[in-house]
Amino acid sequence: MQPVEKLFLSGIQHQSASERLSSLELWKKSVTFIARTVSKGKPKKYRHSKTSLKPQRVNQRRKKVKAFWKEIDAFKTSLKQSKGKPKYTFYDGPPFATGLPHYGHILAGTIKDVMTRWAHQSGYHVERRFGWDCHGLPVEYEIDKTLDIKGPEDVAKMGIENYNNECRKIVMRYSKDWEYIVTRLGRWIDFENDYKTMYPWFMETVWWVFKELYNNGLVYRGSKVMPFSTACNTPLSNFESGQNYKDVIDPAVIVSFPLLDKPGVSAIAWTTTPWTLPSNVALCVNPDADYVQVKDKSTGKIYIMMEARLEALFKTPEEYTILERMKGKALEGLKYEPIFSYYKYMGEKMNAFRILNDGYVTSESGTGIVHQAPYFGEDDYKVCLKYGIITRDMPIICPVDASGKFMEEITDFKGLHVKDADKLIMKKLKDIGRLVHQGQIKHNYPFCWRSETPLIYKAVPSWFVRVEQCTEQLLENNSKIYWVPEFVKEKRFANWLKDARDWAISRNRYWGTPIPIWISDDGEEIVCVGSVQELKELTGVEVKDLHRETVDKLTIPSKLGKGNLKRTPEVFDCWFESGSMPYAQQHYPFEHKKDFDDTFPADFIAEGIDQTRGWFYTLLVLSTLLFGKPPFKNLIVNGLVLASDGQKMSKRKKNYPDPLTIVNKYGADALRLYLCNSPAVRADSLRFKEEGVERVLKDVFLPWYNAYRFFMQNVERLEREEGIKFVYSDSKTDKPTNVMDRWILSFTQSLLKFVKEEMGAYRLYTVMPKLVKFVDNLTNWYVRMNRKRLKGEGGADDCYIALETLYSVLFSMIRVMSPLIPFITEHMYQNLKHLLESDSAKDSRSIHFLMIPSPREALIDAKIERAVSTMQSVIELGRIVRERKTLPIKYPLKETVAISRDPTVVEDVKSLERYILEELNVRKVTTTTDKSKYGAHMEADVDFKVLGARLKGDVKKVVTAVKKLSSEQLEEFQQTGTMVVEGYTLEEEDLKIAYKFDSTKDITPDQYEAHSDKKVLVLMDVSPDQSMLDEGIAREVINRVQKLRKKAGLVPSDDITVFYQATGNLKNIITTFLDYIKTALKQPLSPYPVVSSMEKIIDESQKVKTDMLDLTIVKGHEGNDSGLVSGLETPRLEPAPVKNGVKPACSYINVELIGCGPQEGVSGNQGTILLENPKGCMISSVEQLKEQMKLLFGLRGRRVDIFTDNSLTKELSDTTKVSSLNGQTIYLVPYTGAVTGLCAPPSVSSPYCHFANVNDKQMGCVLLENPRGQKFSVEEIYEQVRKLYNKDGMKLSQSADKKIPLSSASVKDVFELHSTTLYLS
């Protein structure tokens, strides 16, 4: 095992500013010891960093971890280890490699990595293959921009083969960048065994998928009005068009259509697409709506429009006169004069240019009359088809080419892009007197997701997959999928499925998987090819590639005598390819058929919410049509990551920080945790803020990391000073008795149980806040409140137990958090693992090779967790009171009162009273269920800012009623969070609740300041007290000294002496609290002058309040640099008097320090050690006894000689039976190699120290001072008894009838208790 000294190199003290250590100094002190103990001939593959977890250092640590993973080939090794375990199938949605990953990719990738790591560490074999979307518009659009390609004719000039070769060149342009960024973020996924949609074997499976659909009658060719990208010259599917809506300003015009049957009367229609008017063939009205014939008073013209839409043309009723009313049905069949003559023949041939009826016309916008251009609108097409104005097999009236330009027949506007023609068309309408009104409208309009140009709707011939007929089956399969969060499944996705339309899968493009259909010239003979082998059999040619430049050349001889069949020119929509990836990545069914059949559907996928109309949809459609079941079982949907201002992240606007900059600055772990603890994992949008990542580093990682380093430091101290090697074993660790140990272990195990349940339910959004809360509980509560124990101040045994507890918690949590934050947990583990009892049967080189720990139910104690939670509430409420009154924690207060109606809350406070006393720095804690006893009652006030707008005129009525609410009603409101007042439901944010005091009560209201939560009301006695203020000043002196030590780069083990000089009242305060200050400093404190022979380290003059404080710190102790100083010996005191012949209930020894003074702030050279306590529980060995003797005088880590006689000739033997020493005096002498010139006083027959016996089932004893002259407080006596009997919340009485409780108020001087018996209750 690597020695703990080597592991400690980066350790600093946890949190306390007064004791944070200089790593460099400690390193220098430890070099000799390390060199002596480190294993020889075993080079370590992972070295612990000497740096702290600062933003500028995290990158260095990440590199070390990444290098370590590379050295052991961690990812592949983990897959080898899990071979043979149950399979957990994961599908990775393929991104395009034509751009760099953004935060949306990083978020989804992190969620995928967390869940697949978790599955692996939960006992599954998880293959993770990266995939690439290589075909389609993203690639082609880049080439079109680069080569200035405007349309199909440009591609024809250069040739499809040359065009596709250009696409090949850029398709993987950023693949290496992707791999670098993805792995840099800690994601483990296989890039070597990837899949690309342009691989021939992938494309072959796509052909197979299509042929399966074709053979089942699910494919047809037809013309439909579809979203069309004029920039990309191709139609888009409905779900593609729904991905990118933007607010735009378009023209809005009202146009007149003079009725042939009603001279002088015109129907008027409204449109936002003037460019569709040249293709107009009809008008449509709602048959059931009310229409009016109305005269425009300003022009005298007569129009027909929907009555409910008069406001579209007129501002006030005075502007028009209604001449006639009719239903829309009455207008059906009326003919009108066409605007343009391009398609005038349609009037005679197809009975066009008349008014039609359909219910799709609404009163929400326009004039209630809609102009019909059937090949530019889905509803137009449907209505005109119904009335016979168009037929399915007639030549389509669509005079707009693939680039969105008018064709030859539109003579007035030919060659113009339709959007550019709008203004000229409106001018033409005005010139011919058909423009009634011209304006603008801001509305939401679909844009091409690739080119960011507005889409148009136009009819195009396309290949379709029948989806509408299987809507019910899609909904049923969707119901079998577990969605997180569920609302996306039930609302957004289900609603989309209900309106699913047939899927246009063909694109009039070049770089894609060709549609494998060969067709005769007359379109009557069709052959669908499903494999490369089938193509070879039909064409006689074996191909290695399936792109257009290869297969377009091949023909298939007709079996019906129709010559050679040629391939239809379209390629597949790239979404068809990505929807086929579950099968195509396995080259199914040509390879891996059994593997696929055994693992389909997949266990898990994850992507952004935008994929509800994308990948999620295409996966479900194809899986349902092919196999009749869903393609995956579990799905996490993440929200969008926006810029900090709520706008879409834009490279052009530069409104977001570069991801790699964030990773370099704060580390991948911080970014991962920030994203996974954000609204985005609940499918809400996240406004990305760099300061949020920084807060994760500072508020979560740094405290947690410092707790880990604090642990490592104290393991090193335990071995260096006590000679005890720390080795951890779950199986050999007993359940501790200390309440805080039991609490943190219980909290950790409860958390493990919760995390396993929630991760099993894929609810990352519930797990992350709990993990963050754990870090707070560990660092700000457990470690801080147990610092002294962890540093060994309660003895080596108690220190070992506390370290064992902390190790158990750290080791459990790095395992459970390793899937989320893989770098820092690996770093911690590489040092913690050396303290584990070795298990040679397992490969435990990496934290990621270990399984997630199962919760240990035996350690879970709900009662203790509840009690500590209550204690935390009291402490936090007390701190708020202190902050509100500007009372720093260093100033002690008289009393804290905890009030609750719940008796269990009161009992919880009592049981942990000593922690509240220490944390709030109060003299007394009082508990009660009766708040009226303190004149306290609750009052509420309305938050006008919140409620004013909602209640409006009723706000005063509600305010009056709220002020009359009783304390009981308000307490009930605090519990439930809701209340009905004057008919309005009020919630927590609507009311401000505060405690007030009744001035008629005897207790002065100004004495207490209150704050509360739902559980408890806390009162703090904030009345000033001079002695307490003085103690606060004494604490400030301690703080100033500690800061000066830190400034000088000193560590607690450095032997120093502090000299001081103070003016005014500060001098008196230091004198009064001298022992208190020295105890805290654990070093000698002396007034000026400074001893001239001692080496000065640092000095400083400071102002404390109104007085001056001069401090000088010198090296060593006066008279002896070794730290064992004869010049600082304390004057000898007489032993405690014997009263009524009473002796301690337990055997004891007296101990006397000879030839030097005590260290670490201890006062006194005489002390008493109880050899057993309680009666019968004897110290186990002389070695343990020696450590207690050194601890008594602050000599930890010092070498001393120990004698049993005052002539200092008989050394205490390690083989001596401890019980045989009862009543003797033992002498400690500084080690010099030989004892000369020293003489000790004779032994005495009674204890040096005052004592009191304790009556319980086992008699015990407490010391009232130790060493002699260092008197204990009542609180410290209680602490002795608590440790003695392992009981929290017990009380002591001074009489057998237990009527005289022991308290600070009942005992003025603890020496009054000397030789008495205390009774435990």
Image (tube, rainbow, N blue to C red):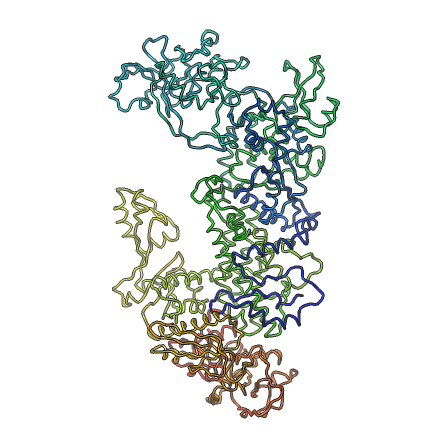
Closer to the camera, 89 or 471? 89
Q: Position of residue 235 (x, y in %)?
A: 54, 25
Establish if 753 lies above or below 834. above
Q: Position of residue 382 (x, y in %)?
A: 48, 18
Is residue 623 shown to the viewer in this render? Answer: no
Q: Is residue 1135 left or right of residue 473?
A: left
**Which quadrant of the view contains residue 131?**
top right
Establish if 296 lies above or below 643. above
Q: Position of residue 374 (x, y in %)?
A: 47, 17
Is residue 624 shown to the viewer in this render? Answer: yes
Establish if 820 lies above or below 220. below
**Which quadrant of the view contains residue 266?**
top left
Closer to the camera, 1112 or 556? 1112
Q: Residue at left 59%, top 61%?
A: 49
Q: Position of residue 1164 (x, y in %)?
A: 48, 84
Image mark count:
0
Closer to the camera, 1260 or 240? 240
The quarter of the image holding the N terminus is bottom right
Establish if 363 lies above or below 589. above
